[in-house]
Amino acid sequence: MQKRSRQRELLLEILCGTTCHPDADWVFSKMREKMPNVSLGTVYRNLARLSEEGVILKLDVGQGADRFDGCNDPHYHLACRCCGAVVDVPMAYTPALNDTAKKESGCEIESHSLLFFGKCPSCTGIK
Amino acid sequence: MQKRSRQRELLLEILCGTTCHPDADWVFSKMREKMPNVSLGTVYRNLARLSEEGVILKLDVGQGADRFDGCNDPHYHLACRCCGAVVDVPMAYTPALNDTAKKESGCEIESHSLLFFGKCPSCTGIK
DNA sequence: TACTAAAACAGTAATAATTCCTATTATTAT
DNA sequence: ATAATAATAGGAATTATTACTGTTTTAGTA
């Protein structure tokens, strides 16, 4: 039987209160500000659980730690190669890509992830 | 000044001789069969170098070790959630996705990676 | 409110994947 | 052949994450 925990609720509040797509360590620091004894294991365990439940999204951006997104509508992201930021890309989510892949390959396709690499709004134009 | 090495040449020969999208450790084992003293550091260093040079592709499949592909034409992959295999998805590479993302976000987009999750041909139909 | 079962936690150890370091070896230009 | 330096082998170190264990918290029940 599933039980609530103050730790998980705080985690979700913090994650939903930012748009920075943080990693586990950032969430851990933020949680420590309000709950000084929370442990990193708890952060990882709850991030894993919430993403398995579909409450949050887990983003693998190809290098460094996994990032998480409190907004769970499927959508796409850009990883900035200048500053490392991960930002939302406001283009339509395209489930039809799954159908195309299925038709071409004959495989059962369940989902996809599309990640762009480039420069985020604040780095665009520099370097 | 860049120098050739027998290690790097063997690595490339092995990677181009398989379609299994192996990880560093698999490449290391195969190399050891022909070159028993090769070190894992050398494998990692050359995989990184060759992928930076664009000679091979580095694939991040969301869990476990990075995978590598000796075929460097941009193309898409499926990660099988049953057996862990990574297989090519024979659908057209779509650079237009970059243009769409650019138009919608105003960001500079350099590239994208599209990864499907589902079942590979040998696992399709089971479970 | 008190009691109990088990879910969740804190703190720590362990693991997996990868990178870094240093002395030695191999490659290439002369 | 010699010299300069790129690359290596082997191992240590780092990073991100997971696993373990004894304690605390939660929630159902009396």
Image (cartoon, coloured by chain):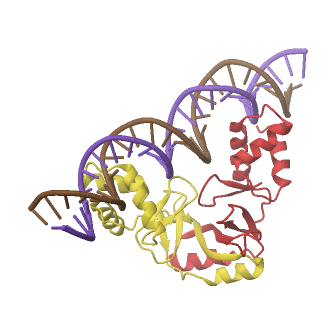
Chain colours: A yellow, B red, C brown, D purple
User: From where the camera sits, is residue A121 visible?
Assistant: no
Q: Quadrant of residue D26?
A: bottom left
User: From where the camera sits, is residue A40 visible?
Assistant: yes
Q: Residue at x 76, y 71 (%)?
A: B121
* Residue D24, above or below A108: above
Quarter of the image with the N terminus of chain A in it: bottom left
Quarter of the image with the C terminus of chain A in it: bottom right
Foreground of the two, A67 or C15 = C15
Residue A101 is left or right of residue A7, and the answer is right
Question: Residue B43: x, y in percent?
Answer: 73, 41
Question: Residue A19: x, y in percent?
Answer: 39, 68
Residue C30 is left or right of residue A88, and the answer is right
Q: Quadrant of residue A27?
A: bottom left
* Residue C28, above or below A41: above
Foreground of the two, D7 or A14 = A14
Q: Residue at x 84, y 43 (%)?
A: B10
Q: Quadrant of residue A11?
A: bottom left
Question: Residue B42: x, y in percent?
Answer: 72, 38
Q: Residue at x 49, y 78 (%)?
A: A90
Question: Residue A35: x, y in percent?
Answer: 25, 53
Q: How many marks?
A: 0
Residue D17 is left or right of residue B28, and the answer is left
Q: Residue at x 40, y 50 (%)?
A: A41
